[in-house]
Image (spheres, rainbow, N blue to C red):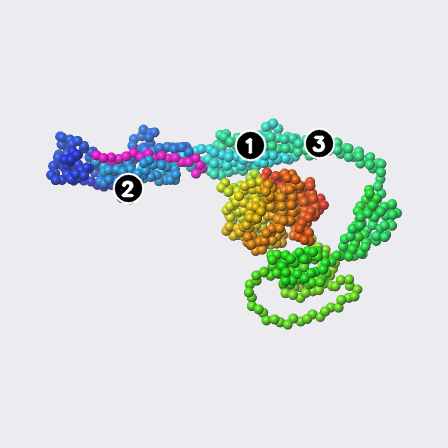
Amino acid sequence: MTKPVGHPSPSLELECLKCGTVAVNRDFCSCGEYLAWEATTLPSDGSEPSAYRPPAPTDTYEATLLTLRDPASLDEPGAAVSVSVMPGTGVGVLATVRNQSQIVDAFDVRVDGLPDTWWTVSPATVFLNPWGTSEEFEQEVQVQLHPPKASESQAREWPLTVVAHSRALDVDVARAPATLTIQPFHDTVMRAGPERRRGRRHAGFDVVVENRGNSPMEIAIAAEDTAARCPVTITPERTTVPVGGSVAAVVRVGVPFPLIFARPVDHRLTITHQANGADCEQEPSRVTFQQRPWLPWWLPPAVGVLAAFITLVLMLKRHPEAPNLTGRTVENATKLLNKHDLKVGRTTYESAPKGIAVGSVIAQVPEAGAEIVRGTVDITLAEAPKRGLVPSVTGGTLGAAAHALAAEHLGDSPQPPNAGDDWIVIRQDPARGSTPEVGTKVTLAVESPTPAATPTPTPTATPTPTPTPTPAASAAPPATKVKSDLAASAGAPKAKAKATANANPTAKAAALPPLPKTFVFAGATSGRLYRWASADAKAESLTAPAYRLQTPTKTDDGYVAVQILDAGRRLVWIAADGKTVDAIAEGGYYRPAYSPSRGLLAVIAADGQGDAPDAGNLCVMDPHDTGAPACAPALADGRRIGRPSWAPNGRSVLALAAGPDGDYNELLTFAPNGDDPAQWAAPTRIYRSAGFRSAVWVSNDRIAVLLAVRPGGPAHLRLLGRRPDGSFKQVKDFPALTGSELAATGHYLALQRGDSATGGAIDLLDADRAHPWLRRLTTGVNPAWAG
């Protein structure tokens, strides 16, 4: 803003009698003295100059003058100011503020166009008298520009404006433009892993380089074998990375020549990277590729020794062959064995297959035609199907009914399937006193323990069914058909199928579920999720490299996993195609596990400290609810809970408990009662060991665990089965199958070998087989079945 001022001709100059200052065209002196008592007009070109005569003002001028200059430059004042700075350092600019108004004023100086933390003004406020007075009417201000050494200080020209704000007028009265050029700096971080890989032909290592500088950089990754023997390829080898971004590459190393019979050979690799053609300050990463032989070195001599031993044994003795005993009675089988100088060994019994007479031989060990070493033949005889007596469970809780039926070797099928153990049984089918085949499921109609109030219906007369006469020759009463609302809701086909199963003692159990087609797992180094399909040759990426994820679990519409951030952890939902990742809950959450039958997510809230960092309190939530989950209170004895797993029917949660030493040494089960774990009953201890790594449900009555028999020892696979009293016992043990994590779907298991942090091979197992190993699937961590 400018203020025109006219100059009369001649000018009116008044001399202050108090201080001797000559004032031009003003009635008051700068000292406050009134001058117009006796105005004396002095010629504008007077021969006797006053003691103080300011320069005559121009016709028009700005009320406030603000100029900038670079103290390191010799440019004239008022020239365009342009300075440059390296992030993390500072540069100064001098600003001169002149008060050309007619009043005393205070001016606040600031910088527009840059974040407030990037500049400092000293002094921030100047107090100036009007121009033309004997007091200070202009002052220099130091403007210090100091952008931080961070990626947000992008390397480019930053236009800025230094502004003077009048306190008297409360407006910005002067502006001066300038340019700050931020110079580029390079800052990169490289991670390579795993540190060790094994293979017969080749191996791959994941490399991630982050650009933490302030300008896009061309990252070039290089790798070499220290012995210069192995071929090395890098994909991609050179990539331009934006500010704050990262590049993921794969270093693939091949073998110089195959090893047929030899010991393993280690090849050591050095991985480096350059930014914009310049070497980076970070130390190179070193990894090791162990080349495995196709056959162990000791195999040829061992085969030779074994062949010689077998030849010698065959030459010295030949064993008799077992006769065919299938279909014979015990008496006939004994006579046939006596003719071959053999005896009947152990005798076992199994339910008679359809068309086989009771008491007949249905299996033998060794089989017919096989050589007999011990001189005995074990036989299996057909027996009448075992039956259980259905107890009366109406009026009790579903949990008590399940235990009562299990004591009779019978199963249970609650309606609705997601009922809790505290629900009340209102009807049962078959009825009390029935004798169905062992293993038959009794249908139980249940209702909530606190049902909503409903109008009382008018009772109707129920016709009394005519009793059916019981045949005298029948060894057990036939199954009774109960005409109830449960049977009506199940439909005629279900009732007919159940009646057929009860009437036919040779009916077979339902077939085990087929092998799921896909499962997901996490990369040990990259943190990405991968999806493997049984029909695919290798796993494919599910999520982008920008997300570092752990412990995925399949939900109805995608996945839930834990995302690792620089500032902590959080639960996230991932779409089925992996393209969408949304936050569910912020905080220290570990090991989510989803139950399809209940639609709930069990997760551990922990502080990440101690020998078991993923142990804490058990929490439950709806994966579509973004609020904080409901958590159970801490156990009274101070133990922490970790690594939950839902039973297939959703009526039990399995978890590991950490002892005083920090290791997981107990298995606990929780009985869910509603969606708030704080209202659940105290957990039940079902098994103890020196150390647990993982535990999952194989069925509603079987558990697969990875346990160590001694502290710090390797963890191997063991199967546990439920006793009639609800406790668990060892069913099978596989000391050779060691690992760190399990995932189950039906009777199929995914076993992760190696360490849970660095990852390892993932093997497919069948828990129903005597030799469960089926094949090797892939390599990674945190396996989870997805379909």
- The answer to whether 745 is drawn above or below residue 213 in the figure is below
The magenta segment: 134-152
Residue at horizontal 26%, vertical 36%? Answer: 98
* Image position, residue 264 (x, y; %): 66, 32
Residues at marks 1 and 2, CA–CA distance in whole angstroms: 59 Å
- What count of labels does the image hold? 3
Q: Earlier in the sequence, mark 1 or mark 3?
A: 1
Label ID, residue 166: 2
Percent of width and height locating residue 303:
76, 34
Name which quarter of the figure residue 11 lies in: top left
Label 1: how many Cα within 10 Å (few below 14, some 14–19, many 20+): some
Measured in 3D between alpha carbons, the distance from the residue under mark 1 to the one under mark 3, in whole angstroms, is 32 Å
For label 3, the crowd category at 10 Å Cα-Cα, with few meaning under 14, some 14 to 19 and many 20 or more, is some
Q: Which residue is mark 1?
A: 285
Q: Is residue 141 magenta?
A: yes
Task: Give, as a three-letter code, the residue at label 1.
Answer: Ser
Which residue is located at x 53 percent, y 48 percent?
Answer: 573
- Please name which of the two marks, 2 or 3, marks the residue nearer to the observer: 2
Callout 1 secondary element: strand
